[in-house]
Each structure stands twice: as structure tokens, then as C-alpha cells.
Amino acid sequence: MTEGGFRRRRDQASLLLLFFLFAILPATVAFGHRGVAPWLLLAALPAFARGDFWLASFGALFDQLDPRRPFVAGFLAICAFCAWIFISGFWSPRAMPSLALWVLAPALVGGAVVWFSIHVSKVWAYMIALSYAAAVIAGMGVLLFEGLSGGALRGALPPADPTPGRIDDIIELGRGVTALAPAMFPAAIIAAAVWNRYAGLGVVLLGVAAAFSNDVSANAVALAVGLIAAILAFKAPRGMIISLLIAALAALLLAPLATYLPVEAAFALGEGVLPSSWLHRIAIWQTAAARIPEGLPFGFGADYARIWSESAPMIVVPDTSELLPVIPNHPHNLFLQTWLELGLPGVFALAIFLIAGARVLASANLQKPIVAASCGAFAAILVSILVEASLWQVWRLASMAVAAMGVGLAYSLHVNWSRLP
């Protein structure tokens, strides 16, 4: 087989693989949200099969390993972050140095998927971008149907769920919405490019409806905040990038101040008014933040919270009929978890990564719709980071990369077809 014939076969196989993955994405998020991580790995195979990916990414990176370049600074920061996770495993009570791979793998695989998305050909740009948007829309549509029907599709599949009220299924569906929520913004931009702006708005509203129907308020808040950020990015793209960076850095650096949250006052004022899960979060954040100073400067080690939860006291949260742990498996705030488990080195590396990412986006001179997609997705991710995310949930990190893939495809669609509004 000639080299040209091999490339054609490779490209055909890559295209078929991507179409297959887009076809199964709705089922993945509806029936097993943790499958987003292996889905992402399979989506990276077309990039891994191309020699120019290795030359253009790692080859160019190590040829110009200048930390003053934002991309290089971001790469070094995430590598340092993961290296510190590995090192902290030696004093963590759980002692799992392999946790570093749980963060590094989605970052590197996600980078490969994004690289492929922005380097596709003109014909592929349209087909793949449209397929991506259709998959995200279909996935959120299935989740909306499941929420409205009480999980009819999940209930029709074995094994039967004996849980009273089938609450486990509803929670799983809510996590499926979480996995797709950031991707709704690039999908909306693609829909606006292919059809019109009303179709783009409809995509985001579909996500909001799915979030409300599956009773996870954090998802509705994430999509609402993301929509506001996306709209403002159309007005002032660079200003919105800077604003989101400042918000993320402030949330990261000020996270330990949660130790001063007035838990008892919040319980008294919020009883019968706020959801019990929100009130529980306040107690969790206050407890985790109060423990941070004891572990500084290096933190208690990766996954410390999981071990701590086994001996932590239980508390009574308003409007609940059972005792709840004052600290669960993780603090339900990724920034608090970083302070608690990884200390100052982890916080510093994560801050550099955030700054570098914003600089890459700001210096790319992207069109407003692409910046809007990026800002909407990041704002939704930031909400998730602040109220529920954990470093050790690989599917959450993978879902961020799936959204980044959509931004890359929206960019390719714009560059090759010039149809974005």
C-alpha cells in the first residue's frame, strides 16, 4: 500500500470512528456518565494516528520550551500540578500516587482532541462540527425526556433499581447533564453557524430545561451563568476573558475564607427556604476550610478527604430526615480540595495553569462567537468547580475536554466556512 493509500484509509477510519462516537454520546451521558472518560480517549485516536500531531505538539513544544510562552507555561503548570499529586501520595493516608494520572490523562488526551479539532480539513470541519452539535443536542434531549418521565428509559433496562423513589437514577441523570452542560455552548455556536442564532439559543435553553427536569440546581445555575458570560463575551470578548480569569483566581485564592461561613445562621435562615443540599454544602465548605491551616504548606495529601470522611462527625441538616456527614468523600469544591490536599504548591500550579489558559485564549485573536463559546463553557465549568466537582472524578475532567473539543470544531467551522454570525 502506498503512503497516500494508507493516509486515505487512516482518514476514513478516523471519520467513521468519530461518527460512531457521536452516535453513542447520547446513550453514554444518559446511561453511564462515567463513560465520558473512555469516550474522550477513543476520540483522541484520530490525532494519535497522525504523525503531524506528534511533531506539531510535543515536537514544537520541546523545541521551544520557553515558559514565557503561555502554551508552554500552561503545559508545565499542569505537569507540575500532577507531579505534586504524585509526590503528595507518599504522605497521604490513602497513598495512591496513581491519582496523578487521573488528572494528567484527561489533560493530555483532551489536548490531542482539541488539536485534531482545529486542524481538520474544510470538508471535515463541516461534517464533524455538525455531528458534534447533533450529538450534544440529542444527548441533552434524551436527558430532558428522562427527567420529565422519571427515568423511563433507564427503568426499562435491567437491572431493576429497588431504591425507593429511584433517587439513584435521578442523581445519575443529573450528572449526565453536568457532563454535557459545558458542551452546550460550542454546540450552540455551531448551531447558530449552520442554521441561525435562534437555533443556538434554543440549544442552551434545551440544556436549562434538562437541568431543571433532572432536579440538580447546580446544573441550571451553571448553564445560566454560562449563558450570561457568553452574551457578555459578544460585547467585550477580551474583557470577559479577563473577568472570568479574575473570578477563577479570586475563588481559588480566597477559598480558605470559607472557614468563616456562618453555618448555624445559614441553617436557621435557610430552613424551608433553601434546598437541604445547599445548606449541607455550606457546612461542608466551612469544615474543609477550617482544616486547611493544619496541613499547610504542603497539604494533607491526595484524596485525604475520603479517609477523613470515615471518621468525621455527622450533622443534622434542616429539611432532611437522616444524619449527613460533615465532610463527604470530597469537599464539593475543587479549589477547597486543592488547598486541603495539595497545599500551596498545588494552588500555585493551578493558578499558573488558569493564567496561562486565559493568555492563550486572549492572544489567539479569535472571533467573537468562538470566544463566547469558550467563555460560556468555562463559566459553566467554574460553577461546577465551586459547588460540586472533585479532582478525582475523571469523568468531570473529561467533560471539560469534550467542551474544549466543541470550541475547536466551532473554530474550524468558522475558519473553513466563514458562516458564524
Image: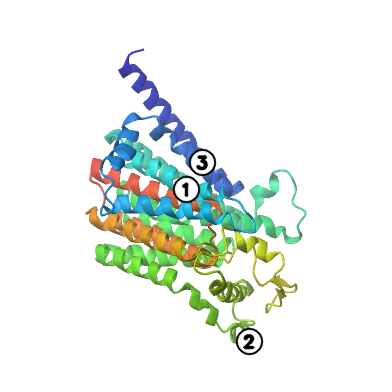
**How many marks on residues?**
3
Residue 300: quarter of image: bottom right
Give the quadrant of the N terminus: top left
Residue for point 57% across, 56% down: 175
Which one is earlier in the sequence, the residue at label 1 or at label 2? 1
Q: Name the amino acid, label 1.
A: Leu
Residue for point 61% across, 61% down: 304
Cα separation between marks 1 and 2: 42 Å
Which one is earlier in the sequence, the residue at label 3 or at label 2? 3
Q: Residues within 10 Å of mark 2 (few under 14, many from 20)?
A: few
Q: Is residue 326 left or right of residue 22?
A: right
Instruction: Please provide percent x and percent y for residue 182.
Output: 44, 56
Residue 27: quarter of image: top right
Q: Residues within 10 Å of mark 3 (few under 14, many from 20)?
A: some
Residue for badge 1 = 104
Q: Secondary structure at mark 3?
A: helix
Looking at the image, which is closer to me, 139 or 86? 86
